[in-house]
Image (cartoon, grey):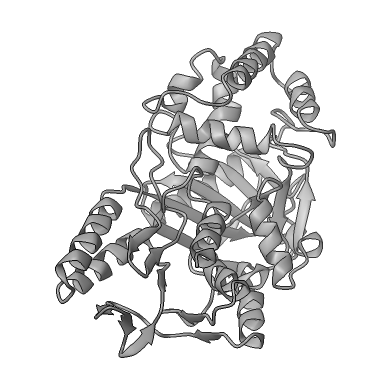
Amino acid sequence: MTAAVAATLAGHQAVVLEASRILGGRARALNGYLPDGTPVVLDNGQHILIGAYTESLRLMRTVGVNPDTSLLRLPLNLQFADGSGLALPRWPSPFDALAGMLRASGWSAADKWSLLRASIVWQVQRFTCASHVTVADLCKTLTPRVVQTLIDPLCVSALNTPAERASGQVFLTVLRDSLFAGRGSSNLLLPTVDLTRLFPQAAAVWLQERGGEVRLGTRVERLHYDWQWHIEGEKFDTVVWATSAQNAAQALVESAQAAPEFIASALHAWAGTASGLQHEAIATVYAWASGARLRQPMLSLPSAPDAPAQFVFDRGQLGGPAGLLAFVVSASTADRETLQSQVLAQAQSQLGLALQTVQTVVEKRATFACTPGLLRPPMVVAPGLLACGDYVEGPYPATLEGAVRSGWAAGSLP
């Protein structure tokens, strides 16, 4: 959808071919029911934005969505239910980060000093490190408490990859552009509307008002090339492929079978790189109890093998029904039934809440595994054929902002 908006602004007519009948891909609305039978609008995963997502916010405004009313803006707060952990004040950057470190509840002087010292080193080194360094390597000088209560949850939420396997360079880029990039860049932006309404639905209306088309329920499984790209017999000057890496690779290999050699070799090369990506799952367990309410809209949770959720969101404070909570399990490995039982037990032991399951959403290939030195497929696939998505070559992990920036770049090309 971003690519289509960008192409329209560049003077082209955009036609969006969407396999689903609901816009948004992995960030879309989902219908469900509370245990008492009340209909409720969920999302196919609990997503958040941060203040550093400048392109996402600009894009929303472009298509008529007001971020000030669609997102709840809060200073970065990674505190646990007992109030311990890091919480930043509403101060200019980097003073907010410095104050948050010094005032972190439950941390000793040694904990705070280890993080402050490491932060200074990262800034002196301009937030760069060797390509083979993992987040765990990067944080060896930090105390165990800082690693367990800040680095591990921050890493798995931003990169969806455990610290021992996650790219140190990408993690540093995220820190640079969030904690140290300017006032408000580290703010949490929590959606107060469902994810389809947050952007893609408004983008579709915006496109159609400017002569574009959005065709739902239209699955594209291959392309045909004869000096111009064809989709089901319809000619296009340029095609932007915006599906998952796996689907894109499969379709392009299929398309290569009848393509000229120079096109076929380009398609195979791109598909080979895309197929080499490893993926991580994300699970969101929605649960409910009458009267359930958190001390703030989002809380960190102590995570362990039998208590897998790293964060919980109070959907009742975010425009949803009271008592509805969303537990997020990044880098998830357990099956659905196990996850549900473990999360309900975790809610009881850590939050004192007896909850009933509403719905569990498991995206088995939610993001690519953001490992050191990872080779990601490029934006240009072949002449007149581009790819965009959060997995396409770029500095960011698999995030909404990464997807938006990729789409904007693809749609802006002449």
Residue 196: % across, % down:
61, 72
Residue 66 lies, with reference to residue 147, above or below; the image says: below
Check the image and name the residue furthest to the top. Answer: 110
Percent x, y of residue 314: 70, 54
Left or right: 147 in relation to 48: left
- Residue 393 in the image: above or below residue 265: above
Asked whether the viewer can see residue 288, the reply is yes
Residue shown at the point (78%, 66%) measured from the top left: 66
Q: Nearer the viewer, residue 282 or 35?
A: 282
Quadrant housing residue 382: bottom left
Residue 406 position in % (x across, y down): 50, 57
Q: Residue furthest bottom?
A: 233
- In the picture, residue 201 is in which quadrant? bottom right
18 relative to 7 in the view: left or right: left
> Looking at the image, how many numbered discs can be counted on the residues?
0
Depth check: 52 or 143 in front? 52
Location of residue 8 (image quadrant): bottom right
Does residue 320 show up? no
Question: Where, quadrant-wise, is the N terminus in this rendering?
Answer: bottom right
Tell me: 289 left or right of 253.
right
Give how far across and how far down residue 71 sits, in percent: 75, 59
